[in-house]
Image (cartoon, rainbow, N blue to C red):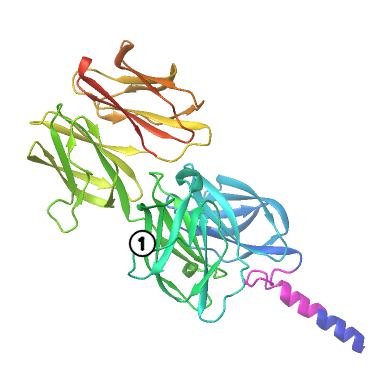
Amino acid sequence: MKTIRIFLSLLLSLAILQGCGSKGSSSDSGPAGASARLVNATSAFASLDMISSGVTLASAVATGSASSYAAVTAGAFPVTLELAGSGTPSAQTNLFFSSGVLYALVAHTQGGQLQLTALTEIEPAPASGDGKIRLSNLAQQDTGSVDVYVTGHGGDLSNASPLVANLSGTSGYSEIAAGTYDIWVTGVSNKADLRLKILSVVISNQQVLTLILTATTGGVLVDGWLVTQQVASLGAVSAQKNVSARVRVAANIAAGVTVVATANAGTPNAVPLDSSTLVSPAVDTYALVPAGALTTSVVINGAAFPFNLNAVAGADLTLLAVGTAAAPQFFLLSDDNRLPLNGLAKLRLVNGVNGPEGNLSLTADANLMASNVAFGTASTASTFTTTGNISQLQVNSAGNVLVGGTYPITLQSQGVYSVFMLGSNGAATAEIVRADR
């Protein structure tokens, strides 16, 4: 009888342990399964469900939050994301789950499409007085590699070294003293190319943290999401979305006319949009501006013209100034500077030709890249297979009439290009090809 009582006690203990499979410790899944939670690190999908093999693992997970852990069977299984309550799959990924491992399944966008990436959550706690942080660049396909700096709060980048340089995937963990820090994300080896700045990040005693970077609509700036390991609640995720946009000026008033543009002109937060005074026709570089409604002053030959623009966070924008010095016109164009796949280049056509030139088309080596591009607009970018040889770009107007001559260029793999047609119709047309990335 004593042997039977011991056996029954063991069975009861095993049942209790199995019942704890969604509580969130690294050993509570049992030998036959794993645990997974959904982290919604998207801006475009406000609420998501997660399903695997007909079982709902997470429901209505809002942007910037995480679900509780759900038990999953070890092995390879398809995992599906759906808009909450829709029952319609928006993304499906085959994932492999190892027995006894906890996972954060991160929903994010890549190439404009919803994706799901698995990150393990089994890192041991650091020593008392320290925290740990790892970095995950889930914007790699769109944005490329980045450098990430962690400085003391209130510091700057001038003498800082990157915590991780050339980050292209997910790093290992770095152990640092608990405290308050600023995090900076820049282009590789270019501190002036600021992609994201997060101020006053508190790393608590023995906290294990992951900074996830995701793509924005413009393709250069990134959003951040701070995820605390094994905390299955809204507090597990802190959204650190970008509060900036990038704007550049393309000027085509009349030949030799000067153009100077300033966002939030006349305020303490004024931002020059020109690296120097533009002499039309010309295309400037991008300037980082605060996101939101911006009152912009465009000074043409000394006369100021107001223009209100809305800079969506994370966007790349071109302010196209055309027309005459007395009666200028302004158009705000959205730029898609997400990187194409390796072996491809992206091309688009911007029609800023003053005069009755009409709609324009663009070919690269006789391959049609854009057609019927109206004045004051830009085409959707098209991809072109790169060869390493010189390609011939050609712009035609209605009736297949060549505009501006043939432009020879070697298109680079993963290059992003805008062909600006400026000047006036006829012989005075100016063709400026700009590498946007």
Image-quadrant location for residue 7: bottom right
Q: Could you say which is closer to the camera, residue 132 or residue 370?
A: 132
Image-quadrant location for residue 148: bottom left
Q: Please, which residue is most extreme toward the front here?
A: 159
Q: Position of residue 106 (x, y in %)?
A: 54, 56
Left or right of 385 in this view: 183: left
Instruction: Identify the secondary structure beneath mark 1.
Output: loop
Q: Quadrant of the C terminus?
A: top left
Q: Quadrant of the N terminus?
A: bottom right
Span colored in magenta:
11-30
Identify the amino acid type marked 1: Leu
Q: Residue at x 34, y 11 (%)?
A: 400
Q: Residue at x 38, y 32 (%)?
A: 417
Tell whether position 14 is magenta: yes
Q: Could you say which is closer to the camera, residue 384 or residue 72?
A: 384
Tell whether position 141 is magenta: no
Q: Is residue 94 above or below residue 419?
A: below
Image-quadrant location for residue 392: top left
Q: Position of residue 309 (x, y in %)?
A: 22, 44
Q: Position of residue 335 (x, y in %)?
A: 35, 38
Crowding at mark 1 (Cα within 10 Å: few <14, some 14-19, many 20+): some
Q: Is residue 307 above or below residue 322?
A: below
Q: Position of residue 92 (x, y in %)?
A: 60, 46
Q: Residue at x 53, y 32 (%)?
A: 343
Q: Residue at x 69, y 51 (%)?
A: 77
**Residue 84 visible within the image:** no
Left or right of 46 in this view: 31: right
Q: Which residue is mark 1?
A: 157
Left or right of 93 in this view: 250: left
Provide the major secondary structure of the magenta segment: loop
